[in-house]
Amino acid sequence: MFEQMRRNAKAIFWVIAIVFIVGMGIGGVAGVFTPKPFLAKIEGQKITYTQYKDMLQRAYGKYADDNPDKEIDDAAMDKINNDTFKQLKDEIIMNKAIKKYRIKVTDQDVIEKLNDPGDDVKQIPDFQTDGKFDMDKYNDALMNNDQFAQYLESSYRNSIPYEKLYSRIKSEVVVTMDDVKEDYINKNDKADAKIIFFDAKKIKNVEVTDEDVAAYYEENKEDYKKDPARKYNYVKLPLEPSDADKNRSKAKIDSIYVKVNKDNFADMAMEYSEGPSGPKGGDLNWFGKGKMVKEFDDMVFKMAVGDISKPLLTQFGWHIIYKRDTRKTEDGQDEVLASHILINVEPSQQTKDNLSAIAMDIYNLAEEVGLDSAASQMKYEAKETREFYADATYISGIGREESLVKFAFDNKVGTVAEPIKQTDDSYMIAEISYEVGEHYQDLEEVKSRINRTLETSKKAEVVSAKADSFVTAYQPEEYLAKAEEEGWEIVDATEVTIDKSIPKIRKVDELNKAILDLGIDQHTGLIKDDNGAYIAFVTSRTKPDMEKFETDKDSLLETLQDTKETEHLNEWYQDMIENAEVIDNRSLYDL
């Protein structure tokens, strides 16, 4: 294709953006040989452990390149894992949509795209002359660099299908001039008002009895109907360094301690420290009290300037601290300047193997005597989750373990799932402890929620009666002054439109409409809702300038069309993601 372009001597330009992940595609021929079990299944497409592991390693590498001064801790690894899976899921789902809409990329599509460089291209220094984009320079680079040309074509063939898909979805939106006129009026029909807010929250000491709660529960019982549910008993086995692991690290820090001094501290930190400050000679910069973990904090603030501490153990490992200086901040707080050498205390492979063996021991024993008894015999604690349902993505106490959700609904009470190795190398053993079909939540389970509902309702009734009495007792011209005397809040609402949420009051459709139906110095009647009651006095009024609308209507149509297209695309995307068929078995693998 590019040979033909060169022969035609047409100007061909830079790729502006790649919409989705380049180089992360999966499937193809390899998919034919995908063995079971699979790591994930997304819209019918199976992902093997090897495929996903390769993607994850690339993501870890990119994170390390982008964050050279940061260690990839457990939280970062979890985020990278979840972000990578989300990108993969999005790509597969979007590719399915591309096939559904029969979207193809032609050579002409690529040529047209390359002939229209964007601002990002124009700002590339290599393609500029005197601060301006130079097409000749760009064209020369393109024509004389095969690798560059191939990259451009590949990039566009990856990105154009997504752009076409998005254009196809956006094309479903048609905005008429009537829509534009209504939108213009809604945004430009405005009023300022002073609103008396009879706030239900100001009502105290309403009484809700057990009889009230029981009656409400019976009257609204269908609201508490639930789908079939399950519960698990579960035991978590955290991976923690053994005493032997701590002693190995202690031996290492001790050998460093006998050699370290003020003069060589930075060099030794650069050579031995396993913390992120190591490349900087262990420098922790200035910090105040409470910025470090307690053991470190206590030690460094009682040391004298120039002291080097003996090895100190914290949750992060063994430290040797060198206190270099102290100072006072402007507000008189103590700060220290310190460096440290950190030797991590990591669980050894032996410790990991031991934990794996313990998990299997508990599992095997649980199959014989049940998980409660097995956990007790092995000196661990078994806990029970709350109810969860077949469409759950999260189990209380356990977390995001969708494979366990499926297991619970495929097996009987008392069945024990094989130990699950989690991303932090800990283990979990779970036993189905409870099953129920369609059912109603127990009254005790929803009692506090009903109590809050009834309390809110009763407060609204009380404040409604007080508002009625207020209106009866005073003339409209007295309302504002008397409301202030009685302690009701006067809310200054500015530029109220039909859709605006009013501070402290929020959006009350009836109130907004009533305000906009009035002129200056007019007031609404008493308006009520579950949060209280309101009377609004209009102090300023702005009507839409329809002559300006006639002048601007074409540009307003274009703006509203863009807005509605973006909203529709976002809604379509969320719907696709939420309704995709996804089986996520990552928890079963060592990632």
Image (tube, grey):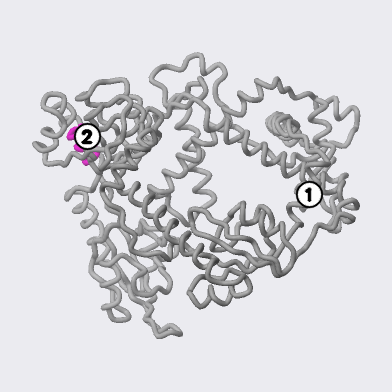
Q: Counting residues from the N terminus, which is met first, the one under dot 1 or under dot 2?
A: 1
Indicate the position of residue 104 as horizontal and vertical percent values.
73, 22
Please provide percent x and percent y for residue 211. 27, 46
The magenta region covers 350-359
| Position of residue 460 measured from the top left corner of the image (x, y, whole percent) | 44, 56
Report if residue 332 lies within the magenta region: no
The circle drawn on residue 311 is: none
* Residue behind mark 2: 233
**Relative to 454, residue 542 above or below:** below
The residue tagged 1 is: 119
x 57%, y 19%: residue: 28
Q: Is residue 368 left or right of residue 523?
A: left
Q: Is residue 260 visible?
A: no
Picture quadrant where residue 2 is located: top right
User: What amino acid is found at the position of numbered circle 2 in the picture?
Assistant: Asn
Nearer the observer, 175 or 68:
175
State the SS at label 2.
strand
